[in-house]
Image (cartoon, rainbow, N blue to C red):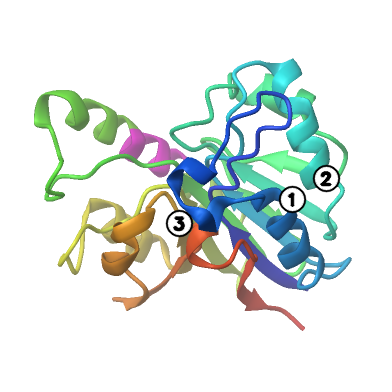
Amino acid sequence: MRLFALGDTHLSFGRPTPMDVFGDVWRDHPAKIAAGWDGTVGADDVVAVVGDVSWARTEDEVRPDLEFLAARPGRLKVLLRGNHDSWWTSRARVRRLLPEGMTALQNDALRLDEGVVLCGARGWEAPGMPWFDEAKDLPVYERELRRLDLSLEAAARLAREGDRLVALLHYPPVGPGQSTSPVLERLERAGVVAAAYGHLHGSDHAWAPRGRFGGVELFFVAGDAVDFTPQCLLEVD
């Protein structure tokens, strides 16, 4: 089994939203997702979609986007909410909406039979980022830290000896030039070995943190940064 991650699919079959206004890389990007995914992921693999799944605003609008993802290879797709996923309501309602072979991660964790525990939270704009607005962003950031704590606590309850913890995030866990953050400190304390995130586009790709930060390997998987192809986080024999 291989665990893959891809972020920012920004699908819009049920609520057409042209993406090529953000650059040619986004032209016909669902076809690029299908080609990259179908040519990379196997039937027994697991794929996490780390936020900004769809531009939909309602359950009816998001259904064709979910069906598109459900039709891709992989035994399980795990969705995380992004800042543009306004169709995402409660965890229970989202899970009832999802096609077979798909689940959602929110304030909890998921253990795979191969000894991998998935946890994480959306996150938010963090202190230290140039565009951070303390009055507007700090309350949301602190709320997301609490949600991350809930997920890490759930992961600790699920984990067995020898398991590997992997975090799914939407926002980057550290900002430009930072080596640590409250998010990263939490991941390290919990024993997370790898974390995948997206959210950043265009010129922000240049500073997106990649590689090892302390004990955590960071994977930047925004669709337009990885040719819309799921990236392998780890492989389990």
Specify the amino acid type for callout 1. Answer: Lys
Residue 70, x across and y down, in percent: 83, 45
Q: Give the image quarter of residue 184.
A: bottom left
Q: Which residue is found at the position 83% from the left and 54% from the top?
A: 72
Q: How many marks?
A: 3
Whether residue 115 is visible: no
Q: Where 122 sits versus 26, above or below?
A: above
Residue 224, x across and y down, in percent: 51, 59
Q: Where 59 sits versus 184, above or below?
A: above
Specify the amino acid type for callout 2. Answer: Ala
Q: Which residue is mark 3?
A: 197
Q: Give the image quarter of residue 125.
A: top left
Of the 4 image quadrants, the one containing the C terminus is: bottom right
Mark before the other along the chain sequence, 1 or 3 = 1
Residue 58, x across and y down, in percent: 65, 15
Q: Residues within 10 Å of mark 2 (few under 14, many from 20)?
A: some
Relative placement, left or right, of 134 versus 112 is left
Q: Which residue is mark 2?
A: 70
Q: Which residue is mark 1?
A: 77
Q: Residue furthest bottom?
A: 237
Q: CA distance from mark 2 to mark 1?
A: 7 Å
Mark before the other along the chain sequence, 3 or 2 = 2
Q: Residues within 10 Å of mark 3 (few under 14, many from 20)?
A: many
What residue range appears in magenta?
A: 144-150
